[in-house]
Amino acid sequence: MFNGAFEAIDVDTGGAIIHCVHGGKGPPLLLLHGYPQTHMIWHEVAPVLAEAFHVICPDLRGYGDSSKPAGEADHANYSKRAMAQDMAELMIHFGYERFAVAGHDRGARVTHRLALDYPERVRAACVMDIAPTLHMFDHTDQAFATGYYHWFFLIQPDGLPEHMIGLDPDYYLGEKLKRWSAPGATFSPRAVAEYSRCFGDPAAIHASCEDYRAAAGIDLEHDRADRLRKLACPLLVLWGNQGFVHRTYDLLAVWRDYAEDVRGFALESGHFLPEETPQTVINALRDFFTAESK
């Protein structure tokens, strides 16, 4: 679904084999997907941005066609720190010491950690439809536990969520897309078929659970250790005005407690901004990253 200007490659980052597609010319722009998807979420956004940027769209470790190592006892190999290191090494592969990055959902959490761990390398960043992980856990209430029940389901031990999701992964995937998007939202059948192909792999189901187990454990340790250190790079925050985070958080105020330079706005969308309102995402990212590359 990416045009012929995009090339697919696999890169060994030392901790994982990262599958990605890349194309275009210009300043480097890394685009990171979320749960339960793959790089395919950028299929409408990336080809247009490639007119002005070298766009790199990987599958995070554990997702898509990237490698899916078995989880460790402390889930550290699915920490956002480990995933961020993958992305830092990926960009070195392409020859980039400094780059811009935008992430949606889980990819936005990797973006947050990437900008914390590699402040000298991230020129500017965008996070889509999230509040910081630590803030969300520290402000858990019934509304959060209801709306984000999967945060607490996926962290259960002993293979429980893996088994239950694995009984009908297509149903689970379809429910996620439907429940988190705005009423009437549609997704490309080809994109959904690709999500289904990848998510149906038992190793992918396990890996995605490990991602959330890390978020509820070792990621919080890392986030608390860095709580007094704000992101130094310019940060664009985008979110859907028909989603949970819009109803629950004053996102700009929250992010200003975690970053020095924050701007952003809500889009006419549910959770899946790059697919529900691709042109608005294109415009926002192009304007922001073009201005910050000067």
Image: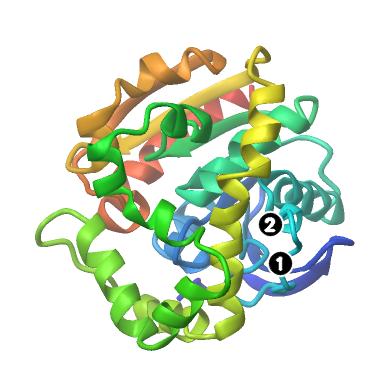
Sequence-wise, the earlier of marks 1 and 2 is: 1
Q: Quadrant of the N terminus?
A: bottom left
Q: Which residue is mark 1?
A: 71
Q: Is residue 245 visible?
A: yes
Q: Are marks 1 and 2 in contact (CB under 8 Å)?
A: yes
Residue 142 placement, left or right of 77: left
User: Residue 142: where, in percent of width, then height?
Assistant: 24, 38
Establish if 288 lies above or below 6. Answer: above
The amino acid marked with disc number 2 is Tyr
Residue at x-position 66% and y-position 46%: 80
Q: Farthest right residue?
A: 14
**In the structure shown, which secondary structural element does the residue marked by tag 1 occupy?**
loop
Quadrant of res 65: bottom right
Q: Farthest left residue?
A: 184
Residue at x-position 20% and y-position 67%: 186
Q: Tell me the crowding category of disc 2: few under 14, some 14 to 19, or many 20 or more residues within 10 angstroms, Cα based.
A: many
Residue at x-position 77% and y-position 35%: 98
From mark 1 to mark 2, how far is it between C-alphas? Answer: 7 Å
Q: Is residue 52 visible?
A: no
Q: Tell me the crowding category of disc 1: few under 14, some 14 to 19, or many 20 or more residues within 10 angstroms, Cα based.
A: some
User: Residue 235: where, in percent of width, then height?
Assistant: 53, 24
Residue 78, label in figure: 2
Q: Quadrant of the C terminus?
A: top right
The amino acid marked with disc number 1 is Gly
